[in-house]
Image: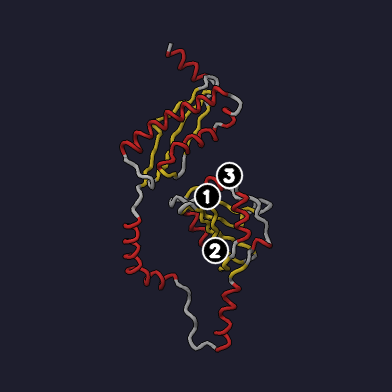
Amino acid sequence: MNIVEDETMSTENVQEFTLSTGLVIAGAYADKVRRTLFAQLKDLTKNDKEMAKEAARATAELNRLLYYLIVDELKSDKGDVVRIRVKYKVYPEKKLIEWDYSSLVVEFFRRVSDEEVSKLLGKVINEKLKEVQEAFGRRPVVEQAPAMETEEKPRETVETEVTAPTTAIEVVDLPEIGETTMGTRLLKIEGPGGESLGVVELSEREGKVLGEVLLVHGGEGYRAIISLPGSIEKLLEEKTLIIEEIKKAKYEKISKDEAEHLLREKMNML
């Protein structure tokens, strides 16, 4: 009987998927697995109660196994982070989801205490700050500059901060490029014709989402930092909120070469 059943499965319509949670707080992995699976199978589960029940069952199965690893064996703390990837097959006619456990990969990142980070930060500042400032600091003001030029310096500084180069361009979409090696999310800033205007890199810190915006427009480069409440996942569902912040941000004007260099660096982090 088992042989006949396996043969039936092999001849019917089989769909293959890969579930990937991205980086997620260890305490929230179960919810992320469930939401990701249902999002991937929304076309199959939307109007099929049996398939929806099977998705819930499969989620519970995988999450129970992950619980034994993440909680019981790894003794995860609330600040630890995991990333889970696994392939699976869906047999729509059989209303069956089958995990390929041989493909299951769990990456686990242990949180370092604030005290240890602060201690090491102090060490780095004491030992390396001068070296970094010499390598990447702004050019020093020219000595013996005319008094008039010195007085006008503050005005020049203000001019580098523009209300937004987006007044001359239109941001219409933010397709996701991918997740970087640092765990941040990189989005492409697109104009009306789908042209690339730059990128925004999103990271989460203490319940907020910070974004570094890089734009190249009209032969100039622009950089700004934006901040929004909530989580990256939530904002990716409401990208208009990010677009509005990009439009309202105050930008520092940088050279086109520097902007393109920073863009290449971010793409190399994928």
What residue is at 42 percent from the left and 44 percent from the top? Answer: 25
Tell me the SS state at disc 1. Answer: loop
Going from N to C along the chain, the mark reached first, 2 or 1, is 1
Going from N to C along the chain, the mark reached first, 3 or 2, is 3
Q: CA distance from mark 2 to mark 1?
A: 28 Å
Name the residue beneath numbered marker 1: 230
Per the rendering, the mark at residue 237 is: 3
Query: Please, which residue is most extreme toward the top here?
Result: 1
Badge 3 local density, few (<14 within 10 Å), some, or many (20+)? few
Of the two numbered discs 2 and 1 in the rendering, the one whose residue sits closer to the viewer = 1
Q: Amino acid at mark 1?
A: Gly
What residue is at 49 percent from the left and 28 percent from the top? Answer: 56
Q: Is residue 254 above or below residue 170?
A: below
The percent coordinates of residue 94 (x first, y second) are: 52, 19
Q: CA distance from mark 3 to mark 2?
A: 28 Å
Badge 1 local density, few (<14 within 10 Å), some, or many (20+)? some
